[in-house]
Amino acid sequence: GVVVGGLRRESRVCKRPRIVTSAVNGRRRVERVAEGPPDLCELTKRLGDLLLSEADNGLLHVERERESVQVNETTHVAVVLGKTLIRDQITVEYAKRVFRLVTQIASYKDQTKVVCFMGCKGEGLVSEAAAGYTFFRSICEQCHVDISGLKFVLLESSYNKGEALRDVFKRINQTLEGNVLQRCHFTFISSDYHLFRVQEI
């Protein structure tokens, strides 16, 4: 099966490919032809394989120690906006957001100290924030990305965008144990639509 957002999804839900044989220059050739468009399971697996391939090539392998959060310097905060889950699993778009965050943190120049995952629990059993956080930790573990010095905040309550952002600032302030929001630099990771909405708010 495939693990997405910390949950195992059995491979039987993926469409089975057809086996097609043909003759080219007198030699038989076997082709695997997918029936219909690739589904969520297959697309997520492709993204995961691509990221792990980059890790094997050393592109995401980082060995460094992070300094503890100092309130007398600018604190960099990454905020990942959640996306509706499908059967308690993250979607391909949500996975791309997490991959962007992993790539950012793996950079030697990155100064992220706090990571915040946003997203409430809908009709399923898992919140968007928890699913994104679990998937993020899984990818970092597989790619050997050091996250030991990071602080994490999960915002799982259901608010409108304005209330959610105010809650982000409040929780970050509590996490850093002091009135340090003036010295925080926020990076929002989401789709262009969400970022336009954040700008409006």
Image (cartoon, rainbow, N blue to C red):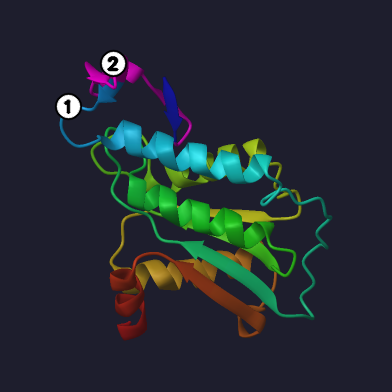
Q: Is residue 19 magenta?
A: yes
Residue 14, position in %: x, y?
27, 24
Among the two numbered marks 1 and 2 on one chain, the one whose residue lies closer to the N terminus: 2
Q: Which residue is mark 1?
A: 35
In this rendering, is residue 201 above or below 14?
below
The answer to whether one can see residue 156 in this image is no
Where in the figure is residue 160, as x and y percent of width and height?
Answer: 28, 66
Q: Which mark is residue 82?
A: none
Q: Nearer the viewer, residue 71 or 148?
A: 148
Name the residue rendered at 36%, 83% in the picture. Answer: 199
Foreground of the two, 90 or 96: 96
Q: Is residue 75 visible?
A: yes
| Nearest-to-viewer mark from 1 and 2 | 2
Q: Amino acid at mark 2?
A: Gly
The image quadrant that residue 28 belongs to is top left
Q: Position of residue 154 (x, y in %)?
A: 50, 52
Q: Which residue is mark 2?
A: 26
Q: Which quarter of the image is occupied by the C terminus?
A: bottom left
**For this rendering, which residue is in front, 171 or 76?**
76
Distance between the Cα atoms at labels 1 and 2? 27 Å
What is the magenta range?
5-30
Q: Can you tell which quarter of the image residue 165 is in?
A: bottom left
The amino acid beneath tag 1 is Glu
